[in-house]
Image (tube, rainbow, N blue to C red):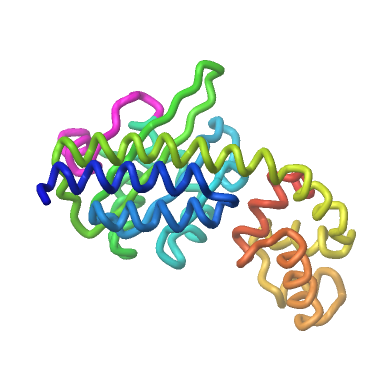
Amino acid sequence: MSDRQATANAMFDFITESSQARDDNAVLASLDKAAKSFGMDCYAISGIPLPNERIDPYFMLNAWPDGWFERYVQENYVHVDPVIYRTKMSNEAFVWSEALADKPLSRSAKRVMNEATEFGMMDGYSVPLHSVGGFQAIVTFGAHKVDLSSEQRGALHIISIYAHNRFRAFMTDNSERMAAAAAKVTPREREVILWCAAGKTNWEIGQILGISEKTVQHEIASACRKLNSVNRAQLIAESIRLGLIR
């Protein structure tokens, strides 16, 4: 089988599988397989916030390396990330190393890119998405090395657009369910989440609220179950998205 045929097969396999998917996990599995077939190690899908906003509630999918999402969100890197800046300025998909090679980067932008390499993201491929209504989003892939032919870039571009649309559709379908789940979050759990968003440790939250560290852990775990979150960062992002905290 030629490389061109293999590329086409990977693209059409993803479109077929994701179109038949019944939930976002099935789309994720298909995207993971497609990304790896193009040599991509990790990926993320997110809306792009306004200058005075955080990126947390805009994330649709996070399949970045462990620890990088948390650091990226905590440091609010979205507003100094040169990949995001390029995405806002152009409709063209791009390889990071090519697009940023001749661009002078600020100290903070260099910091973002250098720290990304600590998590194996030496290079990447990003697809900007711009709607008529002004909404901006990005589908971005990271890898130790990006070596994509023109056909592969085109296929990955189409895959990215389709994946974004499928995830947005499932997010819309899930909105009522998530709103119902948010209603079950207790005032104490909401208070703990608020202090988590402020960057406080479990011990510090316990001291502030006059409860034990173990109780804080219990409140976080309970809120995570209700909002289907796997860690503090996702819990905070979901809470902001649902308006539980601001």
In the orientation shown, which residue stands out farthest toward the right? Answer: 187
Q: Is residue 218 above or below residue 198?
A: below
Q: Is residue 233 magenta?
A: no
Query: What residue sits 43% from the left and 29% below the top?
Result: 129
Q: Which residues are magenta?
A: 88-103
> How far from the left and from the top, in percent, is residue 111?
33, 52
Q: Is residue 233 above or below residue 149?
A: below
Query: What residue sits 77% from the left and 49% below the top?
Result: 177
In this rendering, position of residue 233 left or right of residue 105? right
Pick the residue in front: 80 or 85. Answer: 85
Q: Is residue 240 among the parts visible in the rendering?
A: yes
Pick the residue in front: 118 or 242. Answer: 242
Q: Is residue 25 above or below residue 110?
A: below
Pick the residue in front: 228 or 240. Answer: 228
Q: Is residue 108 among the parts visible in the rendering?
A: no
> How far from the left and from the top, in percent, is residue 229?
65, 62
